[in-house]
Image (tube, helix red, strand yellow):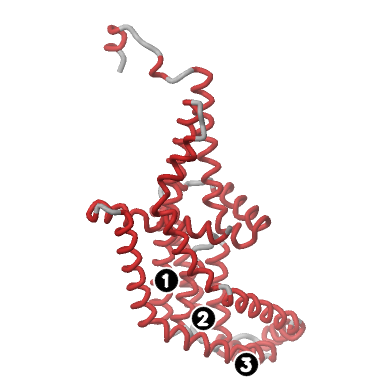
Amino acid sequence: MILFLFAIFFAYLINPAVGRLEKLLRSRVWAITVIYLLLLLGLGVAGFLAGPRIARQSARLGESLPGLMDRATSGQLTAEIGKQHGWTTETQKRIQGFLTNHRDDIASLAQRIGFRAAEAAQQVWLLFLVPILAIFFLRDGGSFHEVLVALVQSRSQREFLEDVLQDLNQMLAQFIRAQLTLAALSLLAYTSMLGAMRVPYALMLGTAGGALEFVPLAGPLLAGATMMVVAVLSGYQHWPFLLLFLFLWRMVLDYVISPRIMGVSVELHPLAALFGILAGGEIAGVLGVYLSIPVMASLRIVWRRWRIYAEKRKFGPLNEYSFPPELGRGRT
């Protein structure tokens, strides 16, 4: 089910490019083939340029993580940060006491995160099935639409279904492209700024931050927390500036860039979006959090179209009423 959902999203992502190329090649199959070859070429170049560095930084972080956790729980890290920022001895003792008392909890949490990351890494190969499944949606998506509409016999119900499907199609296409754009901007901002600030493991952390941008609300929070934890545990001295950058970037992205990119098709009231995210997380975990925004937007579309359909059934469409010629000329 998850693979089919992501395959549909992937098809929505590249469908505009396929449609434009289809007009030139006059063949949808050849258009899909060319787009896939270009994507493979782009991924190959990106992997060749950045892949080895990301792999090396990930390996170094994995090897040094136990030592970093020991420094944090033993109080050595607290003493170093306290000296750098002029903390009092009492403050250092309180922080050190807290870390010492919760040492087992911190170690258990780190172990669970490591196990989850290892389990996710073992399932990465399933992602290669997403573009394969997307081929069928790209090639036969129009046929699926026609078959679904043909199942409805009533003219008014068919118009209602066509309107809903058209609005859903536009909303999902805009949502997927907007999410990719936001993820690319976050990737660029994180890698460039973390690299300029000489944060340890900057490329790996920036790449992870860009990927987590696809998960609404929880993804950016997890990315920012991970960057701060890794920077502090690695002994990075300018972590307050890193925290300031993360805060400012979130404000700019959430309140300036994101509303302009998302557009009106995915607009939701903040309370409705928050309810959807919390409900999605309770029902389906991380996947529910990711799908919460498009699901809530889809429900809004269906509700709006249903109200229009109900009004048409009750009062009839406006074009069914005829006005005298003189009244028609006088209306503005």
Residue 96 or residue 230, whichever sits in front: 230
Of callouts 3 and 2, which one flags the residue occurring earlier in the amino acid sequence? 3
Rendered-image quadrant of the C terminus: top left
Residue 309 image offset from top left, x and y in percent: 51, 27
Q: Secondary structure at mark 3?
A: helix
Residue 239 or residue 8, whichever sits in front: 8
User: Disc 1 versus disc 2: distance between alpha carbons?
Assistant: 19 Å
User: Disc 3 versus disc 2: distance between alpha carbons?
Assistant: 19 Å
Q: Please, is residue 61 above or below residue 264 in the view?
A: below
Residue 225 image offset from top left, x and y in percent: 57, 73
Q: Secondary structure at mark 2?
A: helix
Residue 277 image offset from top left, x and y in percent: 60, 55
**Category of crowding for the residue at label 3, using alpha-carbon neighbours closer than 10 angstroms: few (below 14), some (14–19), many (at least 20):** few
The residue identified by callout 3 is 67
- Marks 3 and 2 in Cβ contact (< 8 Å): no
Q: Please, is residue 223 above or below residue 1 in the view?
A: below
The residue identified by callout 1 is 187
The residue identified by callout 2 is 239
Q: Please, is residue 316 above or below residue 243 in the view?
A: above
Residue sitting at 42 percent across and 86 percent down? Answer: 52
Q: Quadrant of residue 207?
A: bottom left
Camera sees residue 264: no
Of callouts 1 and 3, which one flags the residue occurring earlier in the amino acid sequence? 3
User: Disc 1 versus disc 3: distance between alpha carbons?
Assistant: 28 Å
Of callouts 1 and 2, which one flags the residue occurring earlier in the amino acid sequence? 1
Residue sitting at 36 percent across and 71 percent down? Answer: 40
Closer mark to the observer between disc 1 and disc 2: 1
| Residue type beneath disc 3 | Gly
Residue 183 or residue 319, whichever sits in front: 319
